[in-house]
Image: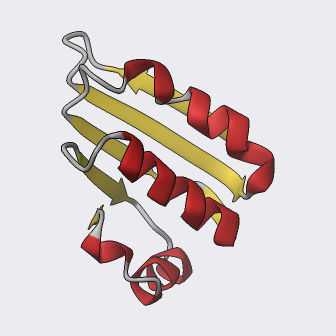
Amino acid sequence: MTTAVTSNLSVDSSLLSISVSGRFDFNLKDTFFAAYEEVLHPVREVTLDFKNLGYMDSSALGMLLYMNNSFCEKVNISIINCRPIIKELLLLARFDKYFILK
């Protein structure tokens, strides 16, 4: 499985969709931050698609919290299409308090 981060901004700049596939770990730090840091202000909603995510570690959890703080918690961030083991990790870490888990 190839590791990649792709992002897509809606035409009106209100919705940002980010897909993470493969391994979500410290090696993706710069790529993950680049996917959203240029569009912080016009965005009102973010969707993180983990459909093809096979692995995530504690550094990925930290990157997600940093992202949430970067948007000043004024943006709804949804995490969608999690495999059961990834969703279980997010729930154990109480990420349902900061993100919408679907």
Do we see residue 33 in this rendering?
Answer: yes
Q: How many marks?
A: 0
Q: Quadrant of residue 23?
A: bottom right
Kindly identify the residue that appears in the image at 19 percent across and 12 percent down.
12
> At which x and y percent is residue 84?
48, 80
Kindly identify the residue that appears in the image at 29 percent across and 54 percent down.
78
Kindly identify the residue that appears in the image at 35 percent across and 27 percent down.
40
> At which x and y percent is residue 58?
66, 72
Would you say 11 lies left or right of 24 here? left
Q: Residue furthest bottom?
A: 92
Between 33 and 79, the one nearer to me in the picture: 33
Q: Residue furthest top?
A: 11
Do we see residue 56 in this rendering?
Answer: no
> At which x and y percent is residue 10?
27, 18
Between 41 and 54, the one nearer to me in the picture: 41
Eyeballing the image, is 31 above or below 8? below
Q: Quadrant of residue 60?
A: bottom right
> At which x and y percent is residue 29?
70, 44
Eyeballing the image, is 57 above or below 73? below
